Amino acid sequence: MESIKIAFVGDIAPGGAFVRTGGVDKEVLTYMSSFDIRIGTLESAFGDGTILCHKKNTPELGTIIFSPDESVKMLVDLGINAVSLANNHSCDCDLEGLYHTMELLDKNGIAHFGAGHNAEEAGAPAVLECQGKTICLLGYLQEYRYFYRGDGYHPSSDVGGINIYSRERVVADVKTYKSIYDYVFVMPHWGTEGSVYPKQQELEDARQIIEAGADGVIASHAHIVQPVIKYHNHVIAMNLGNFAFPDRYVIKPRISYYPTEGELKGKNIPIVDTFKVVDGLSYKVVSDKERKGLVLGLTIENGNIGITHYYTELTDLDFVRKRDKRSLRERLLYFYVSCLIKDKSGLFFKIHRRIFD
């Protein structure tokens, strides 16, 4: 059997400043083209902003991210084959925006999973074929305290929404689909934003998901690269960081905005690098630590999985380019967190929490 090469990337929001810059360096595009399959998390709705999330559009919550329809070109240029929609921004243009996003992806030949027009569709996998083998992709959103917990876009038999995470459900799904397809990859949207440290419960969940039969747990949401480890010859990637998450204009409270040149002319636009509520037109700059990502390359051959790391960064000019070097501090921190993840007993994690909490 010939090998299958799969690239997993982190969060992608193809709008924002990418509308001006085009987004991705040619060297990165060339590298992505070397894979048979490319998969990411689309953490943005497509739309024009005329309909916004009725849950988030308040001064307290804000942070609505959407991308113009034409920016789907970034996904096409990258050769993205499938995206997870199981995240906390897929419904930022409300359910109508979710449906529109799925339709636009369909038109461009990009498979999607983790959301749907009803509960059955939201929970269904995307299935890709390569070298005579089937690759099953499952996406889940871990509910968050500020928005989705019991009051978000929960799908039903006749209403669409996001596929909600629970370990028991994921384990059951993995067992079902592993009996049907050759390879199963689970993509949970979980973790603490801005933190390099995964949660201990998520570590335990990831191990159980692998033990249930998954070939990989490839996660996102933290916007920070967290370590990748091999576990029982399979892969656990706790968070891939941001692959293409740009600086962007926002208006009150924190809604993505696409101003005309006339609106910007002669104005001193304030710059913010936090998630604070804004009073008017502002420019939201992604923090330094969240400008980095990891392209996780997997090579599957004769049941074995090989791993390659390709680090990227978002430049000040809002291009995604290859990142050649990591600082000594980053490498030491990566090694330290890897030790936490590999410690199945949880002893190191308990010591870590006593020291740092």
Image (cartoon, rainbow, N blue to C red):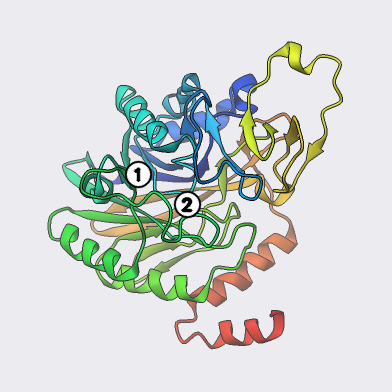
Camera sees residue 316: no
Depth check: give the residue in front, 305 or 190.
Answer: 190
**Nearer-N-terminus badge (1/2):** 1
The quarter holding residue 115 reads top left
> Height in image: 323 above or below 216?
above
Distance from Cα at disc 1 to Cα at disc 2: 10 Å
Which amino acid is tagged 1? Lys
Q: Residues within 10 Å of mark 2 (few under 14, many from 20)?
A: few
Q: Position of residue 145 (x, y in %)?
A: 53, 62
What's the amino acid at mark 2?
A: Thr
Answer with the quarter of the image where residue 170 lies: bottom left
Q: Can you give x and y, in whole percent of width and height, for residue 131 in the image?
A: 20, 40
The dot on residue 308 is: 2
Q: Is residue 146 left or right of residue 286?
A: left
What label does residue 305 carry, if any?
none
Q: Which quadrant, please, contains the C terminus?
A: bottom right
Residue denoted by label 1 = 5
Relative height, residue 141 to residue 116 (above, below): below
Q: Residue at x 44, y 41 (%)?
A: 90
SS class, disc 1: strand
Q: What percent of the width, then of the height, locates residue 211?
A: 29, 73
Q: Position of residue 185 (x, y in %)?
A: 31, 55
Residue at disc 2, secondary structure:
strand
